[in-house]
Image (cartoon, helix red, strand yellow):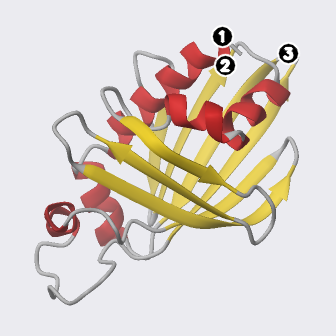
Amino acid sequence: MAEKENNSVAESIENEFVITRTFDAPRELVWEAWTEPRHMAQWWGPAPFTNPVCEMDVRVGGAYRIVMHHPEGTEYPLKGVFREIVKPERLVMTMDCSEHPAEWHDLVNPNRSKEESNPAGGLLTTVIFEDLNGKTKLTIRTRFESTVIRHAMLRMGMTEGWSLSLERLKILLTTI
């Protein structure tokens, strides 16, 4: 387990990635930042990414789609389905990176068949919102189809990306 300078704690266990961070904000507010598209679009992804598309149907079976846009023009679409929602305690959702650029897929799996549509495979993310007397401990757990994919994602900067995103979330929570 490694603690980052911004108080995010990340760990990797077999085919999972876990990061936790405590926010000085009530759980309901952190939940709102995760479930309202207008808020999610402001913090999702590391700077300098923006999210010109952030659509969310927050209900079991509902879909979401986020398009992260880099200032140099590259877009990283992400989509998924909400599998479990327990307001304001837990979100469980799939994550599908199949629409990411081919170059990204080559980094995840350099030996992939070019016909393979989703070399990162299916990801399952569970977000836990824990009330700590007015503060919120957020735990994000992502499960990968294999440890090989997890290792590739970590090499590509998953820990840093989540840490930077959570820093943006921290800033947003002071404004909503």
Amino acid type at mark 2: Phe
Q: Is residue 165 above or below residue 156?
A: above
Q: Residue under circle 3?
A: 134
Amino acid type at mark 3: Gly
Q: Residues within 10 Å of mark 3 (few under 14, many from 20)?
A: few
Figure quadrant of residue 81: bottom right
Residue drawn at the location 38% of the way across and 45% of the way down: 68
- Which quadrant of the figure contains the N terminus? top left
**Residue 138 in sight from this viewpoint:** yes
| Left or right, 38 with reference to 25 | left
SS assignment at label 3? loop
> Which is more N-terminal, label 1 or label 3?
3
Q: Residue 160 at x, y = what percent?
A: 33, 34
- State the mark number for residue 175: 1
SS assignment at label 1? loop
> Which is more N-terminal, label 2 or label 3?
2
Q: Residue under circle 2?
A: 23
Real-space Cα separation, disc 2 to disc 1, in angstroms? 13 Å
Q: Is residue 42 above or below residue 40?
A: above
